[in-house]
Amino acid sequence: MTEAVQVRVARDSSDTSNHAGGAIADRSPRTGCPVHELREHLRKAGLRPTRQRISLGWLLFAKGDRHVSAEMLYEEATLARVPVSLATVYNTLHQFTEAGLLRELAVDGSKTYFDTNVSDHHHFFLEGDDTLMDIPSPAIAVSDLPEPPPGMEVARVDVIVRLRRKA
């Protein structure tokens, strides 16, 4: 119970780009209409496919796996002339997260990102650029986790490796 958490990072992995597995459009066979597919995914996740959810979902998932903040998505929505408030963007991101369509990542106390790739994986965070990149799954092994308190279980382990540019 008092053993330390051991994390091993593979140094030989050069692929830190986002990889397949997260975009809603790629999770099931194509039916021909991406908006129809998005509506079906929202329904399957227990969410009513409202106009705002469809619009924000399209912005989120049409570009493949990515990491966005609420502010980034709000800016994209504004540029795409999607009439939503920042509060609606936050609410929608949290609803998508609760439904299992997104993964929430708290990088700093004040900065939260949402990942369209909900598979088990970890992240590099480039300080100064505020950029998240996926670490390929086999690159990190987490072992010897402490025993959780009675009545609790480990939901997931997030490893964020912070990077900075060399001087």
Image (tube, grey):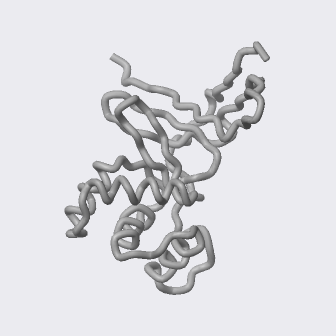
Q: Is residue 57 above or below residue 102?
A: below
Pick out the residue farthest to the front.
151
| Front one among 99 and 40 | 99
User: Looking at the figure, which quarter contains the C terminus?
Assistant: top left
Q: Is residue 130 above or below residue 37?
A: above
Pick out the residue farthest to the top.
2
Please say whether residue 143 is visible from this viewpoint: no
Q: Position of residue 2 (x, y in %)?
A: 76, 13
Q: Position of residue 5 (x, y in %)?
A: 70, 20
Residue pictured at 20% horizontal, 69% vertical: 81
Q: Is residue 40 above or below residue 27?
A: below
User: Looking at the figure, which quarter contains the N terminus?
Assistant: top right
Count of marks overlaid on the render:
0
Pick out the residue farthest to the bottom.
32
Residue pictured at 64% horizontal, 46% vertical: 120
| Quadrant position of residue 41 | bottom right
| Front one among 136 and 83 | 83
| Front one among 32 and 60 | 60
Q: Position of residue 35 (x, y in %)?
A: 43, 79
Residue pictured at 77% horizontal, 25% vertical: 147
